[in-house]
Image (spheres, rainbow, N blue to C red):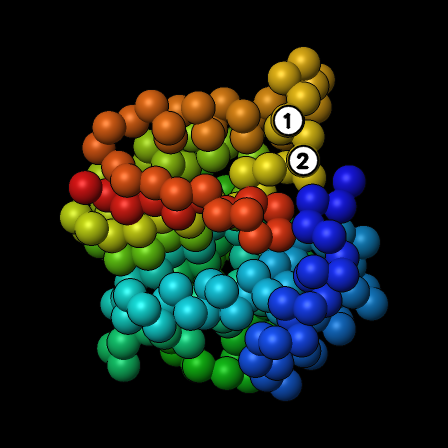
Amino acid sequence: MDIIDPAIQAYAEKYTSPEDALLAEVSAFTHAHHKEHHMLSGHLQGKFLEMISWMIRPRRILEIGTFTGYSALCLAKGLTPDGELHTIELREADSAKAREFFNASLTGKIISHTGNALELLPVMNETWDLVFIDADKVSYIEYFKLVLPRVRQNGFILADNVFFHGQVLDEQTNNKNARAMRAFSEYISERQDIDKVMITIRDGLYLIRKL
Ligand SMILES: C[S@@+](CC[C@H](N)C(=O)[O-])C[C@H]1O[C@@H](n2cnc3c(N)ncnc32)[C@H](O)[C@@H]1O
């Protein structure tokens, strides 16, 4: 299901600043060599993430779900001069590939962790200005619960794929990821200690502010 009209998507991309050379390389590599290339944030959402980061000027960013590194490279652009982005990826091969791209840019600012985020998050002692949740959908509520105490007041959390290809509209869906995203959005909407807006870009992004 195309959530966004492809013609509108193309129109929006046409009037958005182009990808830089490294992002174009990450995208080309991922499309050529990765069967799950649809997971990459891509041009429009990537630019949006970069803009959000420039607006916040974060000192510490956390990303859960590195994949080949596209969104980390976008988010890292708005970091303060002493800033760091920590990104976690379960799969060794993706983590290693992303690290190659990170080494081509912003050396030292992107710190890549390989492993299960559910195990790594409890031992990360940072205070986050911005968190991007973009890993396995069934763990989103758990990721949120683990990171919220470590997000500064008025810090932000972004969660990707809240529409799960539009399948969240089917209340009876048997798809475990669509069900997980429905449960996550219910959970977020009910919490009173956060401000939230769901953004209809790509596969849906939840933007959350800690009160
Ligand atoms: C949707 S992709 C991330 C896309 C990337 N953020 C981007 O926009 O280019 C999700 C990634 O999360 C990783 N992942 C899944 N479960 C994880 C876990 N428990 N801990 C860390 N990473 C995980 C997957 O291996 C996959 O590479």
Out of 186 and 102, give the one closest to the viewer: 186
- For residue 133, above or below residue 167: below
Residue 94, image x and y in percent?
64, 59
Q: Where is residue 24, by image quadrant?
A: bottom right
Query: Which residue is identified by label 1?
Result: 169
- Residue at image point 45% right, 69% down: 50
What numbered label is drawn on residue 166? 2
- Residue at image point 69% right, 39% down: 165
- For residue 126, above or below residue 19: above
- Residue at image point 65% right, 58% down: 40
65 displayed left or right of 157: right
**What amino acid type is highlighted by mark number 2?**
Gly
- Residue at image point 50% right, 83% down: 105
Residue 108, image x and y in percent?
39, 78
Out of 194 and 135, give the one closest to the viewer: 194
Q: Where is residue 55, by image quadrant?
A: bottom left
Residue at the extreme top of the image, as rendered: 172
| Neighbour tally class for label 1: few under 14, some 14-19, many 20 plus, Cα within 10 Å | few
Picture quarter with the C terminus: top left
Whether residue 121 is visible to the viewer of this picture, yes or no, is no
The reply to whether dot 2 and dot 1 touch (C-beta < 8 Å) is yes
**What amino acid type is highlighted by mark number 1?**
Leu
